[in-house]
Image (cartoon, rainbow, N blue to C red):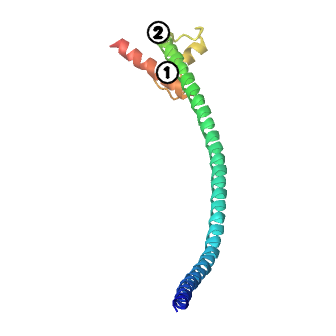
Amino acid sequence: MSVELLSVGLDILVLIFLGITIYYALKLSRSLNSFRAYRKEFDGLIKELGKNIEDAYSAIENMRKSGNESGKGLEAVLKESRFLADELQLINETGNSLAERLESLAEKNGIIAQELNSEYEYDEQLYKHVEQVESKFTIQDKEFIETFKGDKFSGNDSGLQSQAEQELFRAIQKHKKQAAH
């Protein structure tokens, strides 16, 4: 009996271990089925992630191209602005040079005007003398008389054509008045 008992005990023990094995096999099968289902979802997520990565690379490339185009446009604008700045500097230097030349000429004209001032005073006295002579047989210089009768020397600057001539005439008249005082 003891061998039979031992045999029955071992059979029961094998049955218990077999039941435990079947239980774990079923549990493992369920876990594998669940893993396969999650794996399909995970594969879908991986594919979507791959697509998103490709879209990101495409967007980065488009941004790089756009940046390069904008950079080229900005570079062209910057080049044009540098050219214009150089041109403005040249214009400014030319204007300064021209202003210096005009200032030099104005100073020279001032000196000449002072010299002429004394001549005009003499000529005005001569003109008054010519007017006083009322002889019919007197020889008269019509250009000389018209010069002093015209607006240019009578103190009125309306006969002058350009603004520069008018300004020069006023400066000479002002200088004459200052010299007279």
Q: Secondary structure at mark 1?
A: helix
What amino acid is labelled 1 in the image?
Answer: Leu
**Residue at point 61%, 70% (across, down):** 45
Q: Position of residue 123 (x, y in %)?
A: 49, 9
Residue under pointer 2: 111
Quick one: 78 or 157, which is closer to the camera?
78
User: CB of mark 1 within 8 Å of CB of mark 2?
Assistant: no
Residue at the image point whose x is 49% and y is 19% from the top:
153
Question: Residue at horizontal 51%, vertical 89%?
Answer: 2
Which residue is pictured at 52% across the width and 12% down the height? 134
In which quadrant of the rendered view does residue 143 lie?
A: top right
Q: Is residue 120 above or below residue 155?
A: above
Q: Distance between the Cα atoms at labels 1 and 2?
A: 13 Å
Chain-order first, disc 1 or disc 2: 2
The amino acid marked with disc number 2 is Ile
Which residue corresponds to mark 1?
168
Q: Where is the C terminus found, in terms of image quarters?
A: top left
Query: Which of the 4 quarters of the picture holds residue 142?
Result: top right
Residue 102 in picture, x, y percent from top left: 52, 18
Picture coordinates of residue 35 (x, y %)?
60, 76
SS under mark 2:
helix
